[in-house]
Image: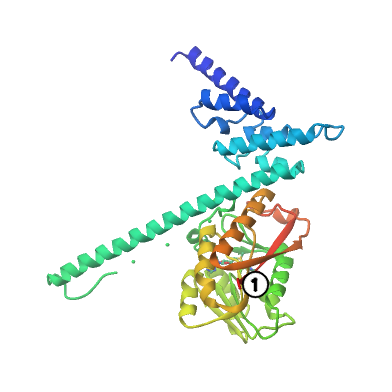
């Protein structure tokens, strides 16, 4: 291909992208259908093209064209909103990606949210829930397959070992052996656990300056302790000490617990806990190690709790799901309550809303009811100075309180 023909080809692609974006902004389903049949692009599907100047996909364009004019909503706006809704559905049915970002770092749903277009917003939330549920299930199958492969490898190793033992090859000694979506952590668990932490007055940071815990979350921790300590004399388990904010609230709570267990895995945090006297506090038991290893041990020892709080760092959503579907069942009293730090997808409202539904469905499947309490948050601004990623950008915190279903 000559340079001129490459340019000509590029021009054709650009003009086709503009066609698709325009048809979507005009909610013209017939024309869109025709483009889906007739056009093709080397890098992506027709429904996922992006305008070069704005980064809009057809979904962004369909929503943004409903922006009210200066004089308020146009008289035909309700019909226009219906047409926009039909366009979104059509695009999504044809495989459009729900959370592509435009040049303003906004997903289509973010635009609907800012324009208060609640029906269109809900369509995008529902699309997000569907996509995330599928991704999570696929991740789960991958994990199960990996586990099966590991087991098979172990079995093969044992067989080989037994074979050689049977053949008298040895003297009897035997040889022997671990987040999607906007909610995925940026660091993985094992990298985090071996990185050095720094604690300034109001935040705990990892080596890459990721915020592990920040003092502005104190109100959330206080309310979480209040929601869990519904009576004096309970036995409570907290997973993830961090800055010890919730544990300090638990210790000074008017409904003082009878037993307070803490699981913490990071050596630097454990060292600070030791320095601050947490290992010797009456009624407090500290378990060093990852919850994945500590909790099955506690369950095997028959430990039970009336209240459990879960707030770790750098772990995936699937690990959290494993926590509540496998561990809570054996550690929580029938009448008990448990809660978790609900920060999944909290860097944008739509992801927060999507994850609220995803987790609600998974909790239901695992046998839990969840009640949400809204918590007002302080205005956050300078808190993020020196922190690599602003992990919180929604107005309200939704505090979950989970119980076994009747
Ligand atoms: C966000 S902080 C907890 C903050 C705490 N809620 C507070 O009020 O200060 C997360 C803590 O979980 C710990 N952690 C991370 N992964 C863990 C694991 N798998 N098992 C136990 N602790 C873990 C981290 O080292 C960190 O101390």
Q: Is residue 55 left or right of residue 168?
A: right
Residue at the left extreme of this rendering: 167
Residue at the right extreme of this rendering: 71
User: Quadrant of the rendered structure where residue 219 is?
Assistant: bottom right
Element carrying mark 1: loop
**Is residue 164 placed above or below 392 in the rendered structure?**
below
Q: Nearer the viewer, residue 58 or 319?
A: 58
Label 1 CB less than 8 angstroms from ligand 1? yes
Residue at 78% across, 36% down: 78
Q: Nearer the viewer, residue 331 or 24?
A: 24
Q: Position of residue 67 (x, y in %)?
A: 77, 34
**Is residue 303 placed above or below 193 in the rendered structure?**
below
Q: Position of residue 376 (x, y in %)?
A: 77, 61
The answer to whether residue 357 of the structure is visible from this angle is yes
Q: Nearer the viewer, residue 30 or 212?
A: 30
| Other-residue count near label 1 (Cα within 10 Å), few / some / many at <14 / 14–19 / ≥20 | some
Q: Position of residue 402 (x, y in %)?
A: 63, 69
Residue at 12% across, 72% down: 168
Residue assigned mark 1: 244
**Is residue 148 placed above or below 134 in the rendered structure?**
below
């Amino acid at each position: 291909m000559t340079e001129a023909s490459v340019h000509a080809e590029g021009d054709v692609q650009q003009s086709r992208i503009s066609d698709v974006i325009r048809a979507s902004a005009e909610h013209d389903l017939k024309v869109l259908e025709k483009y889906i049949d007739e056009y093709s692009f080397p890098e992506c599907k027709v429904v996922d093209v992006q305008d070069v100047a704005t980064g809009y996909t057809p979904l962004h364009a369909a929503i943004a064209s409903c922006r009210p004019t200066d004089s308020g909503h146009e008289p035909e706006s309700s019909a226009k909103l219906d047409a926009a809704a039909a366009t979104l559905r059509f695009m999504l049915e044809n495989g459009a990606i729900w959370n592509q970002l435009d040049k303003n770092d906004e997903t289509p749903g973010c635009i609907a949210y800012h324009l208060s277009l609640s029906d269109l917003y809900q369509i995008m939330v529902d699309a997000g829930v569907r996509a995330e549920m599928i991704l999570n299930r696929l991740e789960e199958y991958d994990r199960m397959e990996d586990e099966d492969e590991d087991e098979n490898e172990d079995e093969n190793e044992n067989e080989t070992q037994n074979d050689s033992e049977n053949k008298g090859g040895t003297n009897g000694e035997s040889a022997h052996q671990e987040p999607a979506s906007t909610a995925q952590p940026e660091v993985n668990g094992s990298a985090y656990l071996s990185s050095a932490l720094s604690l300034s007055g109001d935040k705990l940071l990892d080596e890459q300056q990721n915020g592990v815990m920040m003092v502005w979350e104190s109100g959330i921790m206080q309310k979480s302790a209040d929601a869990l300590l519904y009576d004096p004399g309970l036995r409570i388990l907290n997973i993830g000490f961090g800055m010890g904010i919730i544990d300090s609230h638990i210790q000074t709570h008017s409904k003082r617990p009878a037993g307070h267990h803490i699981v913490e895995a990071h050596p630097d945090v454990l060292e600070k806990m030791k320095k601050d006297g947490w290992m010797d506090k009456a009624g407090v038991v500290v378990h060093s190690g990852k919850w994945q290893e500590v909790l099955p041990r506690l369950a095997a020892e028959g430990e039970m709790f009336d209240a459990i709080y879960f707030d770790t760092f750098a772990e995936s959503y699937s690990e959290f799901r494993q926590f509540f579907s496998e561990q809570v069942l054996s550690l929580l009293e029938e009448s008990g309550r448990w809660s978790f730090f609900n920060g999944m997808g909290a860097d944008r409202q739509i992801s927060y809303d999507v994850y609220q539904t995803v987790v609600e469905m998974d909790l239901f499947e695992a046998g839990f009811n969840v009640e949400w309490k809204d918590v007002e948050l302080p205005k956050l601004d300078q808190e993020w100075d020196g922190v690599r990623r602003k992990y919180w950008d929604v107005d309200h915190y939704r505090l979950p309180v989970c119980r076994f279903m009747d």
